Image (cartoon, rainbow, N blue to C red):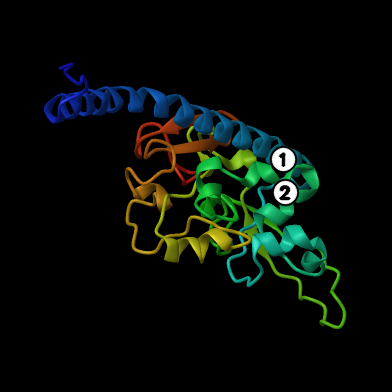
Amino acid sequence: MKRKTGFTLVELLVVIAILAGLLAILLPTLIYPRQLAYRIRCLNNLKQLDIAVETYVQSYKYYPVCVSDVNERWSDFLADETIAQGKMLGVPVSLRPFYQNPNIYNCPVLSKAGCDISYCYNWLAGKKYSAGENVFAAVVPSDIPPKPPSPPEEKTEFYLLAPEKVKSPAMFILLYDLPAKPQQIVDSLYKDIDPDDYKSGDPNGRGYLADANAGPHSEGYDILFSDGHTKWYKRWSDSSMSRDSRNF
């Protein structure tokens, strides 16, 4: 009688174990190039946004102002930009005339997670300052055309940051990745038309960068500095970065 040939159960289990081991070894090497590509694409987005910021600064002599008390979403604005008429809606809307591709606000990792907008603006670069802080340039914006039938908005005095007031441009943060967050946060902060990095209860003034190992790129953050260079950081570095223009 001819003996039937084939794998025994033990042999099959050994083969499966070997394949699983090879997969465990090869999988990180396959994932890393994709993560690196996402990081590079994100850094390129920030480079493009830096051009928009520089063009804005050339036109207005100061950095865009943060506006946190808005109800509009970024996706709604992209669908109908007329919703910005007669309103101050903050940094992304302010920069919109200076670039043509709205996708530069989309980090590939955060976009896949359902985020409408991916980058956070340094609140200390565009906040409303008190009159006593004379280190910053005082700017009174002109009247904003109202959207009928809304009443005209009153003139408001803002104390905004002029680039020449930044003590160390190579260390002063302008924009960076929002941290990877649970879905309930994605449904709020990541839909905001003007996400800034104001974070109450942070004594070190690091904003959302205080969330160590929470960035979207290998748990790190891509950061745009005010001198125009971009760099990926795993965690906060006191010697390399600051959100306060008066530091260093």
Q: Secondary structure at mark 1?
A: helix
Is 238 rendered above or below residue 93? above
Q: Earlier in the sequence, mark 2 or mark 1?
A: 1
* Residue 184 place in picture, x, y as percent: 43, 66
* Residue 4 place in picture, x, y as percent: 20, 21
Return the residue at label 2: 95
Return the residue at label 1: 52
Is 242 rendered above or below residue 77? above
Is mark 2 in CB contact (under 8 Å) with mark 1? yes
| Mark drawn on residue 1 | none
Q: Residues within 10 Å of mark 1 (few under 14, many from 20)?
A: some
Q: Indicate the quadrant containing the N terminus: top left, top right, bottom left or bottom right.
A: top left
**Rendered residue at 75%/42% (across/down):** 101
Indicate the quadrant where residue 126 lies. Answer: bottom right
Q: Secondary structure at mark 2?
A: helix
Disc 2 to disc 1, C-alpha distance: 6 Å
Q: Nearer the viewer, residue 128 or 90?
A: 90
* Residue 155 place in picture, x, y as percent: 76, 71
Look at label 2 and name its amino acid. Leu
Q: Nearer the viewer, residue 23 or 127?
A: 23
Is 213 rendered above or below residue 78? above
Indicate the quadrant where residue 56 lies. Answer: top right
Q: Residues within 10 Å of mark 2 (few under 14, many from 20)?
A: some
